[in-house]
Amino acid sequence: MIITLKKEAPQKEVDKLHQYFTDKGLNVNMIQGENYNVFGLVGDTSHLSERDILANEWVENVQRVAAPYKLANRMFHPEDTIVDVGGIKVGAGQKVVIIGGPCSVEGEEQICRIAQEVKECGADMLRGGAYKPRTSPYSFQGLGYEGILDMVEARKQTKMPIVSELMSADKIDEFEENVDLVQIGARNMQNFDLLKACGHISKPILLKRGMSATIEDWIMSAEYIMASGNPNVIFCERGIRTFETYTRNTLDLAVVPIIKEKTHLPIIIDPSHATGDYKLVEAVSLAAIAAGADGLIVEVHDHPASAWSDGAQSLKPDRFQQLIEKARLVAKAVGREL
Ligand code: PEP
Ligand code: MN
């Protein structure tokens, strides 16, 4: 429920109303703007009557929110949320953030080398998986903690914040200590215990869209993280399953304006998992920027043919560099910057 207070409401009356709703067991989010003062009530509001609330002379308007998500809802938070990832701001105005790196960390030498390369191309952050959610149990499962430490070394050498996927809540301390942006992969988007665990840490979360998740399912997963105490969530569209098999997944670019309308959180695009083919990565990346995405997360490998995972969709550094150059032009054309 959204309660808009009159502009001239005295602070004493605002505090009284705040207490009234808190006493009813509701979580009250104060949204204060220059010209408005709004309460966003989270919890069971079914027992509240709009008429009773409107009887208070300082209340201007009462609105029930039909959507099941509250904390993620733009109605509760009209301004864009800017998520700070180790000093890099995601969702800040017209800025586009670029994350690059291999699908998997293959060792310290490999990740430090690629980190240097993506940085020289213009990347803001480094990606690299240490715990890999593979379809086959016989495929490479990731270097685990050793891979996380290799990422930490790459950050030390390049000063870029690092992104890596957390698969299990029992590793949450390891991630909170070492990783700047904690990725929740498509396969775990509805692992609710994992989402709740992410709500208890101080690091921002990159929430990928589940391959069969509706937009509402996805936003509800962000709501889980936020309701558990972590407001710093970035959405990542990485393609969904459709009848089409030519591409690995089908990129749903309409989600960019939809997420921006429905929520106040940033959204980035993963063109690599969305297409599965390095030749398609540039085209969809440029489209994503034109559509208003706050950033890209791109798989980059200097020897894709021998990559331990996802080589077919990985860009070589020279192609990544070319992508960034073209992205800069597209960004400029639509009033954005890279
Ligand atoms: C990945 O980023 O390497 C990955 C496994 O992504 P997704 O969860 O989107 O499949
Ligand atoms: Mn991958």
Image (cartoon, rainbow, N blue to C red):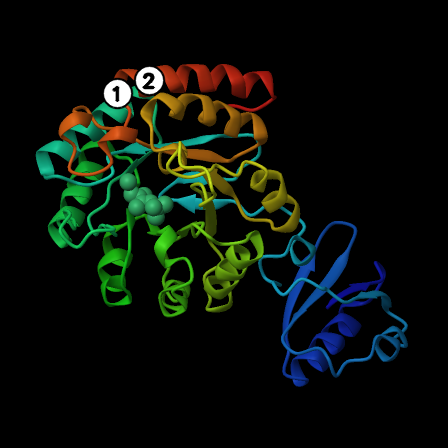
Q: Assess disc 2: are there few (<14), some (14-19) or many (≥20) residues with their C-alpha within 10 Å of its C-alpha.
A: some
State the image coordinates of residue 169 (x, y, percent, origin top left).
Answer: 28, 66
Mark 2, ligand 2, within 8 Å: the answer is: no
Above or below — where is 308 with respect to 183? above
User: Looking at the image, do the residues carrying marks 2 and 1 touch, with CB atoms under 8 Å apart?
Assistant: yes
Residue 321: give its label. Answer: 2
| Percent coordinates x, y for residue 205 in the rendering | 40, 53
Residue under label 1:
317
Q: Quadrant of the N terminus?
A: bottom right
Does 38 sit above or below residue 210?
below
For the question of whether residue 163 can be seen, the reply is no
Q: Position of residue 247 (x, y in %)?
A: 40, 33
Question: What is the spatial separation of the Cα atoms under label 2 and label 1, in whole angstroms?
Answer: 6 Å
Comparing 277 with 179, the one in front is 277
Q: Label 1 crowding class (10 Å Cα cut-off): few <14, some 14-19, many 20+?
A: many
Residue at left offset 42%, top offset 41%: 238
Q: Quadrant of ligand 1?
A: top left
Left or right: 153 in relation to 172? left
Q: Is residue 59 or residue 199 the one in the foreground?
A: 199
Name the quadrant containing residue 307.
top left
Left or right, 20 with respect to 42, comes to right
Q: Residue at x 79, y 73 (%)?
A: 13
State whether residue 43 is above or below residue 189. Answer: below
Give me the disc on residue 286.
Answer: none
Q: Amino acid at mark 1?
A: Pro
> CB at mark 1 closer than 8 A to ligand 2?
no
- When asked about the image quadrant of residue 278, the answer is top left
Three-letter amino acid code of the residue under disc 2: Gln
Q: Is residue 283 visible?
A: yes
SS category of the residue bearing label 2: helix
Secondary element at image label 1? helix
* Left or right for 45, reference 194: right
